[in-house]
Structure formats: C-alpha cells, structure tokens
Image: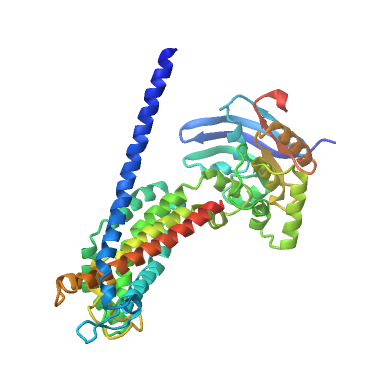
Amino acid sequence: MAGMHQGGRLRQKRERAIRILFFCIALASITTLALIVVFLFMEGLPIFAKVSVHDFIFGTYWYPTDEPPDFGIFPLIMASLAVTATASLIAIPLGVLTALYLAEVASARVREWVKPIVELLAALPSVVIGFFGMVIVAPFLQEILDIPTGLNLFNASLMLAFMSIPTICSISEDAIFSVPTELKEASLGLGATKWQTVYRVVLPAALPGILTGAILGISRAAGETAPIMFTAAVFFTPSLPKSIFDEIMALPYHVYVLATAGTEIEKTRHLQYGTALVLIALVLGLNLLAILYRARLRRKR
Amino acid sequence: MKNQLKIRTNHLNFYYADFLALQDITLEFYEHQTTALIGPSGCGKSTLLRCLNRMNDLIPYSRAAGEVLLDNRNIYDPDVDVVTLRRRVGMVFQKPNPFPKTVFENIAYGPRVNGIRNKAYLAEQVEHSLKQAAPGMRSRIGFMTRPWASPEDSSSACASPGPWQWSRKFCSWMSRPRRLIPLQHRRSRI
C-alpha cells in the first residue's frame, strides 16, 4: 500500500516533465516565427525615416532615383491582393467540389487512386509550375483571348490556383469524410435525398475543416514567388493594373529583385525589409482573419 | 376485425460481405399493432429493422436476398424510390443524433426536406412537437423529428431502444394512426 503513494508521485513528476517538454517545443516554433517578424520590423523601421508609413503603403509610384525619391508600394499590395483573390476564386470551388466528389460520390476504389494523385500534385515544384505557365499557358492565353501578352495577372492566378488546389482538396476531403455517419443516416432516415443531405448536413458540418484547407491553400499561393516570377511580375509598371490581363508588380518578386539585382543593394536594404514586412503583414493578416472566422464558426456549434 | 398486414418479410437473408447476418427471416407486421423484437446483443435486430427501410443500402458490400413487402410491394425492387420509401417508413435511432443546428431547424428538417416551405406551418408543427415533449434533451429531439417526416398519416415507424420510459410513452402516442416495431433486449421492458 505504501508503494502506491510512491509510484503515484513518480508518475506525476513524469507527466509534468512531458507536459513541460511539449510546451517548450511548441514555444520554440512560435518563438521562431515571432523572431522573424520582430527582426524584419526592427530592420525595416529605418525606411520610415525617409518616407512616411502612409506614403510607403499607399504611394502609387516607385521612383527611387528621383529627388525626392518615391517609394510607394501600393501597386504591389493591390496586385498581390488581386492575384490572391483571383486564385482563390478559381481554386476554392474546384478544390472543394473535387473533395466532395472524392468523399461522397466516388467509389472506394476510385478514391484509393485519385486521392494520392491529387496529393502528389501538391509536390510539384513551384518553379516547374511557373515555367509551365510561361511557356505553355501564356502563348495559349495570348491566342485564345487575343490579348497582347499571355504573361499577366490571370496567368499568375491560374498557376497559383494550380498550386493551391491539392492542399484545399486534400484537407477538405478529410473534413467531409469525417462527418459522422449518424448525421447522414439521421437525414436520410427522414426522407432526404443524398444531395439534400450533402448541402444541408454534410457541408455545414465539415465547414471548419474546409475553411482550414482553404486557408492553408491560399496562404501558400499568397506568398509564392516562382510562379508569379515567370508569368506576371515585372519590376516596374507605370500604373495600377487595369484588368486581369495586365502585368503586375508583385511583393515577393519585388523583394527578390531589390535584394539581388537592384542598383544599390546595400543602400536599399531597408527597402527590402520594408517590402518583406508588408508582405508578411499581408499574409499573416489574411490568415488571421480566416482563422478568427473559423473559430467563430466552431464556437457556434 | 383482423388488422391489415402491412409489412412482410419473405425468406429474407442479409449479408455483410460474406457474413450471413440474417438467415431466412419470414415475419409479419400488422397495422395498428406494436410488434417487439427481443433478443441478445448482436443477434441481428437492428439489421432487420434497417432492412425495412433500406438504410442498409448505405453500408458497402452488403446485400439482401429475399423479399420485404410493404403493402404487397417488394421494397427491394429496382424501380422502388428509396427516398419515398424512407418517407413512409421512418426510423428512431438508438443513439440520439441531432444535427448541429438549432432545435427549430432540427425539428423542421423533416418537413423541409419533404418540400414543405410554408414558414407558418413549420412553426406551428415545431411548437406542437415541443409541447408534447418535456423540456430539452438530445434524445427527445430525436423523438420529435420522427412524426413530422411525412405529411402522410399512415406512415409506419421503426424504433430502436431509447430510454425505455420515453420509448413506451412515445410508442403509445405513435401507435394510434401508425404501426410500431420497437427493439429491446429484455422482455420486461416492453
């Protein structure tokens, strides 16, 4: 009987130790992210001595060699938002409907083959996708739509959508598949058809998971550089893009060019930090919005 | 006067893949009558019930051999509309499984998927159901959704064992215009 107490105390210590270990590991991940953001912030702050925050974010001109220099990255922000939005419009419906097909319509054998193939698509290197966009999709678009160039925002959105669809599909499919059978049976038992069950019971129940898939897929697209490098981004355009068939300046590409091929790399270092900071703020902001919305959905049930 | 024969199984055999779960079942269920299926766990009661409204169709690699006749028509005929069948032959589940929606939406679900859109009518029916049940537990939502699945009064109902007091009360209320097949493990609870 005395042994009972002793064993208990040792076990408690061990449990506590494991809990602390897991906490430290999680802390490490979060700390890394926080450090990157803080570092960028500190290094990027000096640029706001040269140009006000307002002018940097909302200024529409990028003429660093002018006197006084113009450092407006508004076109880049707008372009990044536009390309992400267009890519989402393409990728989310396609991804979720594919997931629905796999989870609800496809037979077990079809599912066994198609799901791994979709997941394999996620492994395509982004450079390859960008290259494909440049050499195949661009001439195709140019011909079919009769526009001056196939290298534009639309092309970039297509390629980014291509990259996001596997992620969205895979995670949404897991979510839809995990809806408990009892809910589906309850609905069917009341005389609902299969499709009534899907859109009244299954999809609402799977919504948080589908949102997760969408968030992950789209944030991947928002930050990618390679596809847009090949297909849409140019270093300088004189004005905001007027249609989706224009070329754009884009945030990730801008950082790349400034850091590697700009005329005065060291001197513009804080510009690079500033642009990177805006890019991070954008992506993190989008993610945060989506996560908050998902949390709200979860709390409602 | 003898009650009408409503459902009849005719040498029904049911397989889960290669496993023969129901062996040569021939049973008769009469209108305005409560028929109880009693047996130990795993003997096939739920399987039989699920055969009566073809809920077993949802289970992959399962098949039924033999006939189940509702009003003298085999429900396993290829030209039978399963959705209509389930609107006529309802089911109360053993484990309460309400939808993750509001109580109103849970109760109104049945009529809604059967095409009833009139909000006033729905509200009236929901209120009627709520008055009949004691204030809210999940399993009671289960009982409340069942009667309103179909506007047809002569629909039959199958029931699995819920908390037995509610089952009994529910059964006696239900079995007036309908016919009921409850499931139990012990005779005394019927």
Who's the residue at 70% across and 52% down the image? B150
Say if A144 sits above or below A274 in the image.
Answer: below
Who's the residue at 23% across and 60% down the image? A125
Using the rendered image of the protein, determine whether residue B71 is visible from the camera's viewpoint: no
Q: Would residue A182 be found to the left or right of residue A63 on screen?
A: right
Who's the residue at 67% across and 24% down the image? B186
Who's the residue at 48% across and 31% down the image? B19
Q: On the image, which quarter does residue A40 sit in?
A: bottom left
Say if B96 sits above or below A90 in the image.
Answer: above
Q: Nearer the viewer, residue A116 or B82?
A: A116
Residue B67: x and y in percent read: 61, 39
Q: On the image, which quarter does residue B89 sit in?
A: top right
Q: On the image, which quarter does residue A271 sit in?
A: bottom left
Q: Nearer the viewer, residue B177 or B3?
A: B177
Q: Nearer the viewer, residue A148 or B3?
A: A148
Residue A220: x and y in percent read: 32, 61
Render colour scheme: rainbow
